[in-house]
Image (tube, helix red, strand yellow):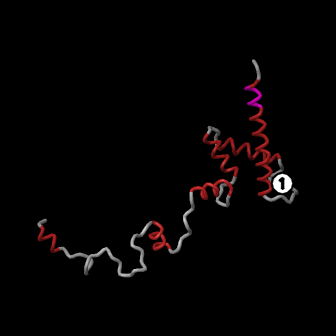
C-alpha cells in the first residue's frame, strides 16, 4: 500500500484523539479489577497471599483433610487405589459400612476414620523410627 491508500481507509472513530477523559470522575488508567468488574459486575476483593494460604490450610475453602492426604500420599508414591482400599477398610472396621444400627452420619464416620488413620500412620512412623534406631 501507498501512504495515500492508507490515508483513504476510514477509521472507526470520529473526533479528536486525546488522552484526557471527558468525565473527571472516571479513572485515568484501568487495571485488571476494573476490567473484571466491567465484564462481570462487582466482584469480591482479591485475597492476599497470606489470606489465600490461610483459607487453604483451615478455612472453608480448604479441601477435606483426607483428600489432601490422598494427594500428598500420591506425590510420595502411594497409589490412590491403595489409599482408598486402606481407608475403606478402616471405615468398615469402625462400623461405617452402612449396616445396621447407629445414628452416625457420614461426617461422623469420616471423622472417626480420619482419626483412626492418623493413629495408624503415627504408629507406622514410630515403628520406622524404632527400626532406624535399632543397633544391628
Q: Is residue 128 left or right of residue 77?
A: right
- Is 128 part of what is drawn in magenta? yes
Closer-to-camera residue (82/49) = 49
Residue 26 at x, y percent in the picture: 42, 77
**Which type of secondary structure does the marked residue at label 1 adopt?**
loop
The residue depicted at 77 percent of the width and 23 percent of the height is 134
* Percent position of residue 14, x then y: 25, 80
**What residue lies at 50% left-to-right and 75% top-to-bottom?**
41
State the image quarter where residue 116 is shown. top right
Return the residue found at the far right: 101
Quadrant of image for the N terminus: bottom left
Which residues lie in the magenta part?
Answer: 127-132
Vertical side of 6 occupied by 130: above or below: above
Look at the picture and state if 39 lies above or below 126: below
Q: Which residue is mark 1?
A: 99
Res 132 → quadrant = top right
Q: Position of residue 105 (x, y in %)?
A: 80, 59
- Looking at the magenta stretch, what is its main secondary structure? helix
Q: Nearer the viewer, residue 107 or 58?
A: 58
Above or below, comparing residue 104 to residue 33 in the picture: above
Residue drawn at 12 percent across, 68 percent down: 3
Observer-nearest of 98 and 119 = 119
Q: Image height check: is 6 above or below 135?
A: below
Q: Quadrant of the C terminus?
A: top right
What residue is drawn where x is 15% and y is 74%? 8
Residue 39 falls left or right of residue 87: left
Across the whole image, how many numbered discs are drawn on residues? 1
Q: Within 10 Å of the Cα at label 1, are there few (<14), some (14-19), or many (20+) other Cα atoms?
A: few
- Magenta stretch: residue 12 in it? no
Amino acid at each position: 500500500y501507498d501512504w495515500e491508500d492508507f490515508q483513504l481507509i476510514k477509521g472507526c472513530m470520529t473526533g479528536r484523539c486525546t488522552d484526557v477523559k471527558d468525565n473527571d470522575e472516571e479513572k485515568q488508567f484501568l487495571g485488571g479489577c476494573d476490567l473484571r468488574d466491567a465484564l462481570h459486575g462487582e466482584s469480591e476483593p482479591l485475597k492476599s497471599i497470606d489470606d489465600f494460604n490461610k483459607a487453604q490450610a483451615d478455612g472453608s475453602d480448604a479441601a477435606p483433610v483426607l483428600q489432601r492426604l490422598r494427594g500428598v500420599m500420591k506425590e510420595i508414591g502411594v497409589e490412590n487405589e491403595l489409599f482408598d482400599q486402606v481407608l475403606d477398610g478402616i471405615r468398615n472396621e469402625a462400623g461405617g459400612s452402612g449396616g445396621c444400627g447407629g445414628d452416625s452420619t457420614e461426617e461422623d464416620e469420616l471423622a472417626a476414620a480420619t482419626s483412626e488413620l492418623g493413629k495408624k500412620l503415627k504408629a507406622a512412623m514410630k515403628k520406622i523410627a524404632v527400626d532406624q534406631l535399632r543397633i544391628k
